[in-house]
Image (cartoon, rainbow, N blue to C red):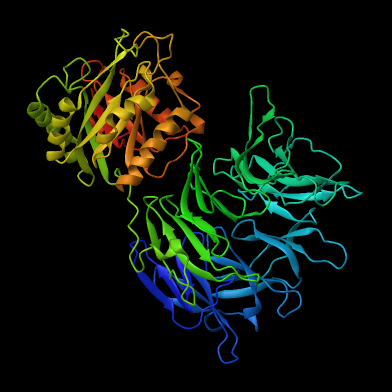
Amino acid sequence: MAYVEGGELTVLESDGSKRILAETAVSHSARTVAWSPDGRWLLYMTEPLQNQPGTYHIWESETGETLQLSRDVAGYPPDGETLSNHRWSPKGARILFEAPSDQSPKGIWVLDLNARRMWQISDQPVVNAAWVDDRQVLYAPMGEGEPLPSRLVNIGPPSQPHTGTVALSGPWSLAPDRHYAAGLEDHGAGDQRLRVIPLPGHAPLTVSSQPTGTVAVSPPLWSPDGRWIAYGAKAIESSPASETHTVVIDTNGVGGTRIIDAFTPQTWSPDSRLLTGPSCSDAGCGLAVAAVSYDLPGRLTGTARSLIDQGTESHLWSLAWSPGGAYLAYSLTGSDVDTEGVMLWDRTTGEHQVLLSGDEAHPLTDLQWSPDGCRLYVAQRRSSDQEAMPVESILALGPAWEDRWAIASGASSNGDASAEASEVAQGDRPQPCPVSPLIGRRLIAYYGTPLGPGLGVLGRNGLTTTLKLLKEQAQVYRDLDPNVETVPVFHMVTTIADDYAGPDGNYNHRVSHETIRPWIEGVEAAGGWAVLDIQPGRAELDEEIDLIEDLLMEPNVHLAVDPEFIVNAEEVPGEDLGRITGPQVNRVQARMERIGRATGRRKMLVIHQFDDRMIEQKDVILDYPFVELVWDADGFGTPGSKIADYEQYRAEAGFERGGFKLFYNYDDPLMTAEEVLGLEPPPALVIYQ
């Protein structure tokens, strides 16, 4: 993380240590302090000193070398410090700069960092420019009176002739894969409609029909998967204060266009299923979310539902989805809202949580997630009559949501600080985000229950003998792959499904903590872990997790769920094949996430599967940052059928890590450890039953 404080440019390392890159006065504006996409380069600018022009610099994180562009780059233009609106190329080795239309140099310029060379690709002022790839740029020249068609150019060096003209003259945006450009096209009398144009080498798209008689009020917004495009619009004859609606079209052309009333699109969730933005009506404004998908008949479905009612005097400062799409963070202030500050919405549970209090005098802005979703960064500003509000402090929230870490100073220049910021420990390093417990490790597990041999190898012998046999099995894998830490695991079924109702009618019985505890302690003493497996029967998943939650709080205890034994009120475990849905998996993940955040450790969740019917709506499963989701290819049979299951699951949605189960008595033949390690990728969890 890079930030400017007191004229110093500081980089915060992942371990919380700080490095000062520049101790002279450093500017901090929209055109400076920007990382390349791969994090290798950092662009920044020093302020003018003693009537000297400011200077662009680029720091390379791998070598620590700093380039001064005016000194170290061939072809750097005179007065190059007036360049702005930088855009990194997709691979991060080139930068596109724009020059203001009223200054020299004009047009757009490209900097190649590997060649340390800069050159001009157009001497015309532009209204929009974007990288198509690392060799081509699409830009819209600024004409006199009428907009000019956009141009596609091979950047060289030196600049090559235009490779094409794109028939879009107004605002446009590129698809995430940069294969298409979408713009709003005039159809006379102010009527505007979306047009999608393929870039060279790509086939045209068939988009759904659009409403007529509207004028766009926001630019095209592509969903991350490139399927949907949303834009805000109003009726041509409407008043300035009338409602904005959102138009969502399908670039696959499968069904009709969706109109979402009283809603303005602002950001998509990472999985392209939710569209978020302000929703305003006569009753006031709020933050709303719209679900976007197609139902079976092929109709676009989903309506906007309010997440919060902001009121008429409130201000929504910032929105940020977590990288895996499980959380939406937002910040707001206002006299008619119940809570001000940074809020967190859990998409699965629907719960809102206050992360950091704020007010109109100290608004919280610029929400940004760490790439792993572990931590949220917030800028606290001081209200000002000027357009740019000074940053008072930068705070880090997490890993536990109760954590507050001051990255930069928590006080303003006059010594004032908000009450919330004054409670943050100054100068302390943020706690590191925990890494995946499965990185560099392989788990070798014995499956069963301590109650007896009915479910598997675990339970056929006492604790001491079982542990001895498990160590011997683990050693086989350790010898074959010595560079990976091999961990012995007791995979214990603690809620066991029954084919009879029992006194509570749940078709299960539970193993007591007094029975489980010695086995957890025994395997931990041998450097191993425990996985507690639940087969709910007709009971609710939450009910069974409640019974073992205190054990799951322990560092080396994790959870497994067996959908085979999750049945409805008319079914019987063992007679009917159970199932779990994607939303149910998300709810279990949300619980494990809370445990992980509270303990500062990522938790493993194992889901068993051997039949496609066992997992419904797999494609809606989210990525919770503190949960390592392991899909276990369960079921006995021949090596070919078992391997086919594993390869299928690894290609499906929600796959993070692979698990593989082997049956000593039922597999025909039992696969060897060498064959198991030959799977791609090799399983992180190998279970013997």
Comparing 100 with 165, the one in front is 100
| 5 sits left or right of 539 in the view | right
Q: Residue at x 80, y 53 (%)?
A: 167
**Place of residue 603 in the rendered image (x, y in percent of width and height, measured from the top left):** 32, 40
**Place of residue 395 in the rendered image (x, y in percent of width and height, measured from the top left):** 44, 62
Q: Quadrant of residue 253?
A: top right
Q: Quadrant of the N terminus?
A: bottom left
The answer to whether residue 201 of the structure is visible from this angle is no
**Place of residue 582 in the rendered image (x, y in percent of width and height, measured from the top left):** 47, 29
Comparing 260 with 72, the one in front is 260
| Outermost bottom residue | 50
Q: Is residue 284 above or below residue 570?
A: below
| 684 sits left or right of 410 in the view | left
| 594 sits left or right of 8 in the view | left
Q: Quadrant of residue 301?
A: top right
Q: Quadrant of the C terminus?
A: top left
| Outermost left residue | 464
| 59 sits left or right of 246 in the view | left
Q: How many marks?
A: 0
Comparing 177 with 159, the one in front is 177
The answer to whether residue 306 of the structure is visible from this angle is yes
**Place of residue 61 in the rendered image (x, y in percent of width and height, measured from the top left):** 42, 68
Comparing 160 with 594, the one in front is 594
Q: Residue at x 32, y 50 (%)?
A: 434
Q: Residue at x 43, y 71 (%)?
A: 409
